[in-house]
Image (spheres, coloured by chain):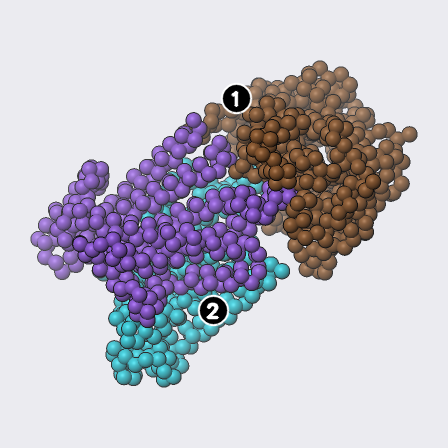
Chain colours: A cyan, B purple, C brown
Amino acid sequence: MRLRLPHAALRWGLAILVLHALMAGFGPLVAPYGQAQMMAGMPIEGASLAHPFGTDQMGRDVFSRALAGGWIVISLSVAGTLAGVVLGAAVGLFAGTVGGWADEVLMRLSEAFLAIPFLIFALLIVSLAGPGLQGSPGLLVGVVAAVYLPRVARMSRAAALEVVARDHVLAARLRGEGAWTIARREVLPNAIGVLLVEFAVRAGYAPILVGTLGFLGFGLKPPTPEWGLMMAEYRNLLTTQPWAVFGPGLMLATLVIGLNLFTEGLSAMASRAGPGRGP
Amino acid sequence: MRILRLILARLVASAFTLVLVSVVVVVGVQGLPGDAAARILGREAPAAARARLREELNLDGPLVGRYLHWAGGAVRGDFGTSFASRLPVAGFLGPRLLHTLALSALALLFYVPLSILPALVQARRPDGPLDRAITVVTVLILSAPEFLSATLLLFAFAVIWPLFPPMVQLTAGMGWGAYLHMLLLPAATLGLLLATYGVRLLRESLIDIHRADFVRMAEFKGLSDRRVLWRHVLPNALIPWMNATALNIAFMIGGVVVVEKVFAFPGFGSALVDALQLRDLPVITAGVMVAAAIFILVNLLADIGALLASPRLRTLG
Amino acid sequence: MTPALEIAGLSIAYRVPAGWHVAVEEVSLAIARGEILGLVGESGSGKSTLGQAVMGHVAAGAVASGRVLVGGTEVLALPRAALQRLRGAAVGFVSQNPTTALNPAMRAGAQIAEVLRRHLGLLPDETAARCLELARAVGLPDPPALLGRYPHELSGGQQQRIAIAMALACRPGLIVLDEPTTGLDVTVQRQIVELLARLRAEHGVAMLHITHDLPLLATLADRIAVMQRGRLVECGPAAAIVRHPGDGYTKALIAAVPDPDGPAPAPRGGPALLAARGLEVVFAPGFLRRRPRPAVRGVDLELGATETLALIGESGSGKSTTARALCGLVARSAGQVLYDGRPLAPALARRRRADLRDLPYVFQNPDASLNPRRTVAEILARPLAVFHGIGGAEARRRGARALAGVELGEEHLDRLPAELSGGQRQRVAIARALLAEPRVILCDEVLSALDVSVQARIIELFLRLQGERKLAILFISHDLAVVRRLAHRVAVMQGGSLVEVAETDEIFTRPRHPHTAALLAAIHRLPKTA
């Protein structure tokens, strides 16, 4: 009877994610207006059937813009998460399997990076990258990866340490097998479940991170229809046309809900805690 | 005394981490390859202006010397002069940090009950209707980006029902009551957002501990359900919660950036964001270091708290 | 007079994906006041489920039918509040693992005191006095000091005495003991059993003693009940059950118990193949941590090329560490390890591949020593690939042959460890060790996780293997009866030192060291069948 909830979560999550994928893929093709089309309606029109999220100061259709933003948010999040998880897992599994001074150095260093609150760390990277790189999707992917790398490294190191202490790894060491063989044959197959859940958890937060950077003015630049950025752009419409603010917010929140439900189901099946704190 | 030795070990480790962070930050901020002055002023800026800035920011010379110069000032409380406002960094960030600390303290008052009570309700009947309802609510709050939830609350309590001001304005002569009124909505927002993480974690650990042998044993001793909860389950479940709370407070240092931006709160977070926007290197360095120091301090306190609360940790280290 | 416990037609079933699993089926039994009933069975027999039902506990998702009367009160139908008044007062419970059964964040004395306050409503100073009295009754040394300690500051035996004091606190008519001595050292086991016998004599408390240890019950219990797959197959006076078992399963169970007085294998001479000289292992102290502690000090040991040497001792005596230092899993701090007359390097990385091949290690727990993500065929292929460069179909053929050698069929090759039973897994681990074609195998408590019937078959397997090929075995164990059946010589360790080495019969009949004598005195024996 504990099995019902996670499966339901998995189903719902998957359904929402499929819907978002369809919107991201085909939304711009079937959108009522072009995402940059000015005067698609009167400026600052409220929500209606013609304009589900209303229009903005320039008369652009907010819904059409939001639809166009989907693939940007999703591709940036997935790319950044993938890079961060793969690199972090490689570092962590290596450190955990090899142990000794390499492990000590890598973990001290990751501790130092973890001591900087992740959002401030992300803002710092963008700021230091300079005006030339700011607003480029590549930088954003790098920022997401950089935020995740030390976190994933610590987690996969802990997973590796747990496996390395097991007797079957001792048996492999007694056969004289090297660190690389042990990491590949003994540790990775037993840590892969944890790593997959980790990927899902991180992927669930990445859209928020991308959106937050956009909202604070450290992400993509206008007129890119990224949802966090749109919310910042339309902030002064909050009293007159709140749909312009909450429409893109709704898109972002439902995407993350889908990801989190999916992760919840996945991790319940792998019997591990669900979405945790932040990145 | 074993406990003192353990605390000392944690202290030494924390100090080491802090120094390591300062190296990473100072080297990262000042020592990146390429011309920092060009990054600040833009490539089109005249060479003379860039040279002047480099000199002012102490960007020339070997990295080791520059780090020692910064560290030497920092231990005396001198973090340099803000390049944008021309004020000493300490005097500029200090008062804003106090506002943020007041905001955080108030948020903590919301956080503690909001994170404990729902978890207790959930753990009474895992998978029951209340548990599921609260799980859905926490997943919803957790899935909404902080800037969205904060904007929603602002919209609800400052626009629809204007109980609170939509923008936080702190003036020099304002009374305590007015100050509190200004802080209340952002603090409640911050506390609520953090509490969802606490609820989820505490629920898990309550249910975990409920399955532990010693809780079964306490039930087999015939203790009342209330005593089993208060004396056997809760003290053991709160230890991981304390560590999570430390992480939450640390997260608050980052989350405060967003909340301050939404409520236009003139605190440490918004000052840091402005500095990052302007590439005001001395303020950035000091601000990041302050955030890291608070993070390390809070985690240190949580570690010591766990040591004191858990007899087993206390003797086994 | 109502019996202390009466169970009538009790069945308990769990919902499992494939339908219902019946854990307890139509069990009826009774325990008279002051009587000790031993309930024996192997893992999965439903004996623990039964014990918890006596406490009025049925796991969530399980259904129970039938009646359980504790002192005349039906506990399965009792409302929660009434049940909580009965538990602890009319019936006490002692669980298997005292380390996890005591609240780590509460002092030992407080955990006894709360039972007294709850059920007897004693005043604080009365409670304190009664706690001291109980602590003395269960034989705790220095009660005032020990009651003020936290559970982790007590030894396993002391923790179990605290747990017994908790169960006894309100003078219940019945105590349920679920494997109360399983995790403890043999000498401590013996003390706990003596304590239980004394408490019964002094307090007249009835006991339901659940265990897999038949010899222990033969000395302690008045009557013995035998459970197999949820059913009660036999119940009767202890002596009668042990001497004249009526049921086939009980007969097999008794036959499988190794005899500590049986003949030992004839000693084998010959030169030493593996030897330790002044072996010492010191675990390095951590940063600001405790002083370095020697785990093994000055051990001299010789293992002949075709003999089995048993290494015995209590937990923490250094027997595992000694074996691990021999094979290089733990680096020694001083001394020498000689193999075939040549010194071996302390660290694994510095040893020759041929030396690694010759010294495989078989671990205690086969759940952990087999990679759960690899099939049996893949697991068995590793030593072949690493040491003999054999792969592909040939490796599979040899793997199948090795399985046959440990009495497992070829069909097991494509299974994952999780799809095997505990005994089968340990056979796979042994087969893997043998595939390296070693000259020595180091066996670390390889039988202790297994049921007696499985144990007996693996003992026969070892005896056969040693008859078939030239093989030296270092056999670490805490079970002296097994050692007598298997070992040519016995080495006894205590506190990191070797205190006595002699031929097996010599050790059992004329122990020279007092610790050896104490270990021997702790053995429970089945009465000889007439």
Label 2 element class: helix
Of circles 2 and 1, which is in front?
Answer: 2
The image shows residue C211, relative to residue C508, as above or below, that is: below
Neighbourhood count class around disc 1 (C-alpha, 10 Å): few under 14, some 14–19, many 20 upward: some
Q: Which mark is residue C252?
A: none
Q: Residues within 10 Å of mark 2 (few under 14, many from 20)?
A: many
Question: Is residue C512 toward the left or the right of residue B118 in the image?
Answer: right
Q: Quadrant of the C terminus of chain C?
A: top right
Mark 1, chain letter? C
Q: Residue at x 67, y 56 (%)?
A: C61
Residue C77, how many percent across, how many down? 72, 53
Q: Quadrant of the N terminus of chain C?
A: top right
- Cα separation between marks 2 and 1: 62 Å
Q: Nearer the viewer, residue C52 or B283?
A: C52
Residue at numbered disc 1? C334
Q: Position of residue C515 (x, y in %)?
A: 67, 19
Label 2: which residue? Answer: A17
Helix or strand or loop: what does disc 1 sit on?
strand
Up/down of A158 relative to C301, above or below? below
Residue at image point 12% right, 53% down = B50
Q: Taking C118 as reference, is C24 above or below it?
A: below
Q: Residue at x 21, y 49 (%)?
A: B95
Chain of the residue displaying label 2:
A
Residue C448 pos. (x, y %): 69, 36
The amino acid pointed to by label 1 is Ala
The amino acid at mark 2 is Leu
